[in-house]
Image (spheres, rainbow, N blue to C red):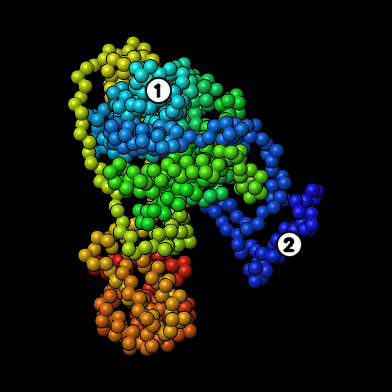
Amino acid sequence: MTDPLFPEFSPASRADWQAAAETSLKGKPLAKLTSQTYEGIAIRPIYDADDIADLPLLDNLPGQFPFLRGTKAQGYLAQPWLIAQELAYGTPQQLNQALLADLARGQTAVNLIPDRPTRLGLDPQQADPNSVGRGGVSLHTVGDFATTLAGVNLTQTPIFIRCGAGALPLAALLLAHAQQSGVNLAELRGCLEADPLGEWVRRGTLPLPLDKAFAELALLVQGLRELAPQLRPIAIHGYPYANGGAHAVQELAFVLATAVASMRALQEQNTPPDDAAQAMQAAFSIGGDFFMEIAKLRAARLLWAQVMAAFGVGESGQKLTLHGRTLRYNKTLTDAYVNMLRVTTEAFAAALGGVDSLHTAPFDEEQGQPDELSRREFSRRIARNVQVILQEEANLTRLIDPAGGSWYVEWLTDQLAQRAWALFQEVERQGGMVAALQTGWVQAQVAKTAAARAQNLATRKDVLVGTNLYANPDDLLTPPAPHAPLPIPPSSSSVPPSPSIISLASLINAAQQGATLGQLTAVLRADYADLTAPAITPIPWQRAAEPFEQLRLAADAAPQRPRIFLANMGPLRQHKARADFAQGFFAVGGFEIVYPQGFADVETAVAAALADGATAVVICSSDETYPEIVPPLARALKAANPVISVILAGYPKAHVEAFRAAGVDQFIYLGADCLALNQWLQAKCAA
């Protein structure tokens, strides 16, 4: 070793570190601290230079192929990531009010989430009224865009619109508005986020055949190339997989496979590979596994560059533009303020991983539409300011690949890239992404991971703070707000002339003459109006906390909270650890816990429990005392009240059968199924 940082100290070897660690573990082997991730990666407690000595890209620089360390040589010094907060208001007027407020307070990009009818290419009059304005803004005329974007300088502010599968008519409305506003279309920047395959797997269907969806996309790619070359039409989304429970390797592989399928489909529509590649970006969910998420984004750039190079794409198209969105899967209604902390670490990981734009979700996003007159404005501001602080106070914009050089991060990035590449190749062996979705193979991979996550949450091997551990029984849940249907405007009576040739320019012209979204869609799809994509099994978006939240909502809705009496036996030191454990275990289900001082004898404990009237009793003491006190206590409780539930805190294996025979119904302990036991007890209390 040359030029040591502190020459007065002898360098420590891995063996030295291991010996010191095992001393702190009181002789237990260091391997005990190795953990297994959902990605199948064994995470060790110690890494050193030897772990990355053979990695091929250690000398790779930012801005160099394959862009592991970023697509720009100067990183965020050249361009900070865009603060691109979603504003899912239902009407253009509401959205504009929030948008102008946020752009004046640190937001640097417009991020529109259209409602589902808009993504399907429907006017409000053609859609289910309950879906209009639900989960996004209703946009169906040039006037709607004018109202939404009033006061926004589109030459200075990039715009993102999650268009789903129907981007072409929506793009025509946007560009028609821009032209009417005197904007030079060549100065428009951002992404329309068309993703036919992502929408297909999210919904299980599409309103048009897949080949027609890509034919429309090819027209859009060509049109934007000519009119607005800085406005990308396509974003390959990882959201359907991550919010379905997928792990990082699956999200990476399926995004990559979707990009490859989209490239091939566009080539079949005579789109040159360079044009197709430069029309794309990717959008990833950013979850709570901090280092895994940093490594995922770094690996995404690496894999993308290699795939695009294989298509013969030039350097510009090999550079992946990355959008990030904080994950929905791990957000909670219970103890919702904890979501502030979750999105903070997720945004930090996104910045260290090198996103180009980012949305951080408000802590109460799952409670329904934001409302300027309630705390929702507060939550929106906090979410936005997470990014502002990371840029302006934490100075992350002064760093280039800040995680680079970390032995662990470099090793983990390589592990993710290798495993994602192998899974991508398996998708290819299945016949590609379209075939793998049609057979349900992709859905089965995600479902397997989601089931493992659910089991680990149920047994509290995984933790959602405030939901399955450290629950606050005084925290009243606010259920998701019901959607209030919006007033439906009258149908347009005008029918603009149909263009003789369908192109982006001709659709813009029709929009200038008053054509609505629905009318543009009808003209565009006249020859295949009754055709759809084949139905597949969708990947349902879910939140891991929902089963636990159902318990809490049921407890809150009951006329009286179900009660549990803790039969704490003996002095404090004898019962406290298990009494505290039992209290936390059942707080998850919203139970009211009666926590008395320790009882000196069985008779006193039984009398107190019966006098309390609780429907369940948890016996809390030590393994040494259980053989003496559990059988008489359980028998006495059951004799006086046969329907009372008797639970033991602990699992003394040698006595389990005898205790069951005496009347113990269940046992709670580390690793027990907390969800199932709370569900069981809540059902018994409600009977």
Identified at 55% across, 42% down, the residue is 395
Asked if one can make out residue 444 in the rendered structure from this viewpoint, the answer is no
Residue 526 rendering spot, x and y as whole percentages: 30, 20
Residue 81 rendering spot, x and y as whole percentages: 51, 35
* Front residue (pair 474, 334): 474
Asked if one can make out residue 576 in the rendered structure from this viewpoint, the answer is yes
Identified at 72% across, 45% down, the residue is 54
Q: In this view, does 402 lie above or below 660?
A: above
Residue type marked 1: Glu
- Per the image, label 1 sits on a secondary structure element best described as helix
User: Residue 16: which numbered mark, if any?
Assistant: 2
Residue 342 rendering spot, x and y as whole percentages: 45, 51
Q: Give neighbour class at mark 2: few <14, some 14-19, many 20+ (Cα, 10 Å).
A: few
Q: Give neighbour class at mark 1: few <14, some 14-19, many 20+ (Cα, 10 Å).
A: many
Q: In this view, does 370 lie above or below 559?
A: above
* Front residue (pair 415, 372): 372
> Is the Cβ of the residue at disc 2 closer than 8 Å to that at disc 1?
no
Nearest-to-viewer mark from 2 and 1: 2
- Per the image, label 2 sits on a secondary structure element best described as helix
From mark 2 to mark 1, how far is it between C-alphas? 62 Å
**Disc with the residue nearer the chain's start (2 vs 1):** 2
Residue 174 rendering spot, x and y as whole percentages: 36, 23
Q: In this view, does 554 lie to the left or right of 50?
A: left
Residue type marked 2: Asp
- Residue designated by label 1: 216
* Front residue (pair 592, 274): 592
